[in-house]
Image (cartoon, rainbow, N blue to C red):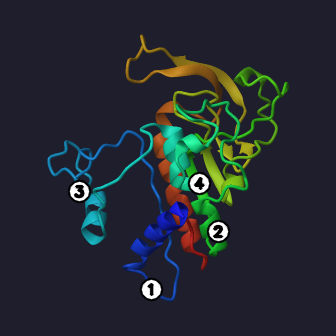
Amino acid sequence: MITRLLLSLLVTSCFLHADHHKLPNVVFILADDLGIGDVSPTNPECKIKTPHLQKMADEGITFLDAHSSSAVCTPTRYGVLTGRYNWRSRLARGVLRGTSDHLIPAERATVAHLLKKAGYHTQMIGKWHLGWDWARVDKKEKKWENIDFSKPVKNGPDINGFDRYYGHCGSLDMAPYVWVDTGKVTALPDRMEGVTSKQDRYGWYRKGPMGSDFHIDEVLPHLFDKGIAYVKERAKTKKPFF
């Protein structure tokens, strides 16, 4: 029921300015560590102006009463996709690690599942942080040293309603640092990287293997480019996208 309500909210808001004979495209952006005072529409005095978000707010609807069962990454994503309390999953509290197995069972309905059934092409781009199953040399050992990056990654966003996905396993401070494109690691790790909190209080990340095409300081613009490319690609087709 909660999932249907969320789906209804997303689709209804898009229909306000859409052709009634055509399903609207849905772009859902989940931003980490973004407060209500950080963007222009909700705080005219914010230090960094966000004119594009301001335009969206002016031409659409802004909701100012939102609630979450948790203030951290994994449970927030779990709730958004499934419409369930995060403590109903095996992860009652906290977040997953970069090497954690998948959290949402394939049979659990998600917003992506519902939109896919409605005829949408679905894709996830960016930080997943809901677990997927790395290929392991020893299936009982969960550390990244035991991962075979040359083999397919299983039970990722693809079992939770997404046709395609491109992203990283968890937070940007969690190894392994590789891009995964719908079950395939795009480039094998060729180095070890990490920065301690003593070296950089605000830019530290755990030491671990990093793919040859993965660069910490380029992650955000890289994902931005991927997102824009996807929207442009799907805009050429007649099938709506999420």
How many angstroms separate mark 2 from mark 1 (CA)?
A: 20 Å
The furthest residue to the bottom: 21
In the rendered structure, are the residues bearing label 2 and label 1 in contact, judged by CB atoms less than 8 Å apart?
Answer: no
Count neighbours of disc 3 (C-alpha within 10 A) and say few if under 14, some if 14 to 19, many if 20 or more. many
Residue labelled with disc 4: 124
Q: Is residue 65 left or right of residue 120?
A: left
Q: Secondary structure at mark 2?
A: helix
Of callouts 2 and 4, the N-terminal one: 2
- Seen from the viewer's position, the closer of residues 187 and 149 is 149
Of callouts 2 and 1, the N-terminal one: 1
In the rendered structure, are the residues bearing label 1 and label 4 in contact, judged by CB atoms less than 8 Å apart?
Answer: no
What residue do we see at 65% from left, 32% from top? 212
Residue labelled with disc 3: 41
Q: Is residue 113 above or below residue 175?
A: below
In the rendered structure, are the residues bearing label 3 and label 1 in contact, judged by CB atoms less than 8 Å apart?
Answer: no
Q: Is residue 23 above or below residue 157?
A: below
Of callouts 3 and 1, the N-terminal one: 1
Residue labelled with disc 1: 19
Q: Secondary structure at mark 1?
A: loop
